[in-house]
Image (spheres, rainbow, N blue to C red):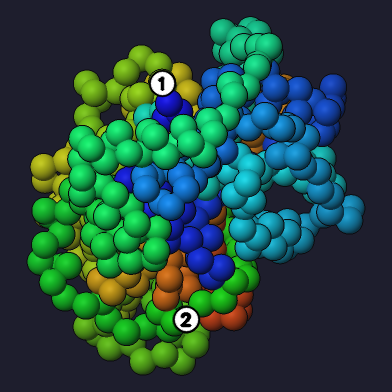
Amino acid sequence: MPPRLSALDASFLYLEQPTTPMHVGGVSVFRRPKAGFDYDRLVELIEQRIALVPRYRQKVRHVPGNLARPVWVDDPDFDVAYHVRRSALPKPGSDGQLTELVARLMSRPLDHTRPLWEMYLVEGLARGRTAVLTKTHQAMVDGISAIDIGQVILDVSAEPNGESGGRGVSDLWMPRPEPSDGQLILGALSEAVARPGVVVDNARAAAGDAVATIGKVVGAATQLFSMARAASRRAPGTPLNVDISTQRRFAIARTELEDYRRIRTAHGCTVNDVVLTVVSGALRNWLLSRGEPVAASSSLRAMVPLSVKGEADVPSSATAGSLGNRVSSFIVDLPVGEPSPMVRLHHVAHAMREHTSTARSVGADTLARIGGFAPPTLHALGARAASGMSKRIFNLVVTNVPGPQFPLYAAGARMLEMFPVVPLAKGQALAIGLTSYDGGVYYGFNGDRDAMADVEVLAGMVAESLDELLTTVGPRADRGP
């Protein structure tokens, strides 16, 4: 019998609506090598590596009558050229043109009759750059049996068969026969005999009983004991919490990791504390730019999925089975009403110490020693965890995943930047994802097209907020006074 979707994975299919497609994405920007990095080379790379993520050649098959959760079956018509697509910007392509393309592509739902992923090669960027956009349904990326495909195309060397050890495992793949409706029903009935309540649960979930389904997601996706007090209060009303449309806007921001480390050292906090404080300051300035009322006590409540476990828990190589339990979620009140950047930092650091006293977060230096590229998968796991929470108790999602502090390559092309695209939840107009990589910290702002027409303004305020914090520490040695 084919593997059945877990209750959590199936819930992402049942809860998907036109305004809230359940896919997560990432935009990686590469420097084009002399040997070239074109569509044919990307397709060849995917064909070499896709055996590492067999789920990406499988599709979802529903059981007649919803007698049981759907199953994963091999797609007999799998065509890598359908999933790996090509796009181009008018030369010289700008960041604005790239983010507009990303927004449009991420607005489109995935085809549920095929494997639930897409990848786009975007050519024409200025300064000899090329971008790769990945788009994967949350039902696929569980960090245990499946990781994000954006993770497996990258190497630590420009020579795929050199220092990276060579991960080309191209195989002669033969799809297994699909089960018939009768076989699926028989399997479902056998399961029902063993667990009679499963049939009722599946029928309710598939019929759209969101309350029952979300309850199961919360239980399966997150350990929320540390959030009990915050969860008992409704999130404050903000312009971020409105009915959203089917269309998106996307914006990016670039900063330097060294600036966060300087602030961390000066104030005895963590890099993540600094990140959340920078986000708080940017949101404060954005609200003021809109003429929104901002009092000293104003706050925005963020759901913050964090990578957890200590260094001793990190294996020597990143396998699919090693990622599933590295994400826990915390609710943090961001002090957007506080005018002093230093006081904002102290508020955030205090709140995070309370949450993380029993969980250890992984630093960038630790994840750098993992053999694979964990950030795409960890962002997906963070989005899954946040999707399981009631949207009434937080205003936005902020996922922060530390990445390796050395360059990575795809088919010899050096990855310069990586911007996450975190999906929106119902009634929430903004999600923020960021990844530190090779000395930079890269933000991706995914917003509703109608409610967040000024999302680029918010992204531009990240650097302003970071500069406010930098004024509280000494000058950098390489910059002078």
The amino acid pointed to by label 2 is: Asp
Task: Please tell me which residue is depicted at 48% across the width and 73% down the height of the picture.
Answer: 429
Disc 1: CA contacts within 10 A as few (<14), some (14-19) or many (>=20): some
Q: Is residue 203 visible?
A: yes
Q: Quadrant of residue 313?
A: top left
From the viewer's side, name the closer residue of 55 and 320.
55
Task: Please tell me which residue is depicted at 25% across the width and 47% down the height of the picture.
Answer: 198
From the viewer's side, name the closer residue of 411 and 108.
108
- Secondary structure of the residue carrying tag 1 is loop
Residue denoted by label 2: 243
Q: Quadrant of the N terminus?
A: top left
Task: Please tell me which residue is depicted at 89% across the width and 53% down the height of the picture.
Answer: 91
The residues bearing labels 1 and 2 have C-alpha atoms spaced at a distance of 39 Å
The amino acid pointed to by label 1 is: Thr
Q: Quadrant of residue 452?
A: bottom right
- Secondary structure of the residue carrying tag 2 is loop
Above or below: residue 268 compared with residue 252: above
Q: Position of residue 304 (x, y in %)?
A: 31, 56
Task: Please tell me which residue is depicted at 43% across the width and 52% down the height of the picture.
Answer: 65
